[in-house]
Amino acid sequence: MSGGCCDVDTVDQLANGERRKTLYAVLAINLLMFVIELGTGLWADSKALVADSADNLGDSLVYAMSLFVVARSIRWRAGAAFAKGLIQLAFGLGIVISIMVSLLGSPQPIGVAMVAVAAIALIGNVVCLGLLMKHRNEDVNMRSVWLCSRNDVIGNLGVIVSGGLVILLDSFWPDIIVASLVGVVFLHTAYEVLRDASRSWRSNA
């Protein structure tokens, strides 16, 4: 009987160890992409790139929090997921405010830089998504992590499209529109994560 219990504990330890390795990998990738996208976004005057870098920073905070609770109780993980939802909400609102402030001036984004950096970020985030794919349905904590990574891929594709349109149309509006869409994705993800976390918290009360 005790041997069976040890087997279960061993399986749990192996699963948590695998989750930790995955989370450390995606954390490192997202921190690197945050620095690259933020620096390029400020230099290229691109709100879409800055918004995408905020997404990577938010995800880095999410992954760090997920590492903290990966082996803790379901209620701990639900609480962490709720905090992640609040982080997503804060970044979404921050992007919206940033766009409104930008429209008071005359933004001049550099389309070529937007496309190049977003393409590099896309490769990194596709790698993250692939690493997280097998963990996405394990619990509310890992599902929230996977949702954040999925949003990164969507955001990167949006920035690439907007950069191409900035070049083609010689207009800053594609950049503003895509940044707005990234903000909406943040807000929608915040809703999903907060909803799932609330359900998990109540069901394990």
Image: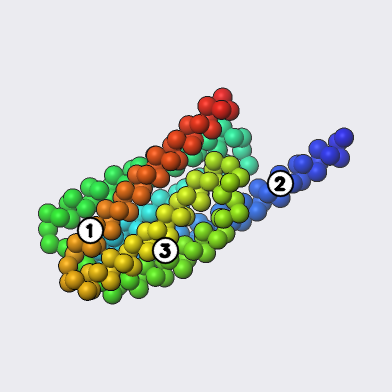
Q: Residue at x 71, y 46 (%)?
A: 13
Disc 1 marks a residue whose amino acid type is Ile
Q: Quadrant of residue 172?
A: bottom left
Tag 2 and tag 3, C-beta contact below 8 Å: no
- The percent position of residue 159, horizontal first and vertical second, equals 32, 64
Q: Is residue 35 left or right of residue 105?
A: right
What residue does disc 1 label? 176
The quadrant of the rendering that contains the C terminus is top right
Mark before the other along the chain sequence, 1 or 3: 3
Is 161 in front, or is 190?
161
Give the answer, above or below, for where 190 lies relative to 116.
above
Which of the two discs, 1 and 2, sits closer to the camera?
A: 1
Tell me, for residue 11, which label it has, or none. none
- Where is residue 189, by image quadrant? top left
Q: Which secondary structure, mark 2?
A: helix
Q: In the rendering, which numbered label is found on residue 33?
A: 3
Label 2 sits on residue: 13
How many C-alpha atoms fall within 10 Å of the one at disc 1: few (<14), some, or many (≥20)? many
Q: Residue 121: image x %, image y %?
A: 42, 66
Which amino acid type is shown beneath numbered disc 3?
A: Met
Residue 39 seen in the current view: no
Cα–Cα gap, marks 2 and 3 = 30 Å
Q: Earlier in the sequence, mark 2 or mark 3?
A: 2
Looking at the picture, how far across and down is residue 38, in whole percent? Answer: 33, 62
Q: Which of pointers 1 and 3 indicates the residue nearer the eye?
A: 1
- Gap between marks 1 and 3 measured at Cα: 21 Å
- Camera-side residue: 39 or 96? 96
- Figure quadrant of the N terminus: top right
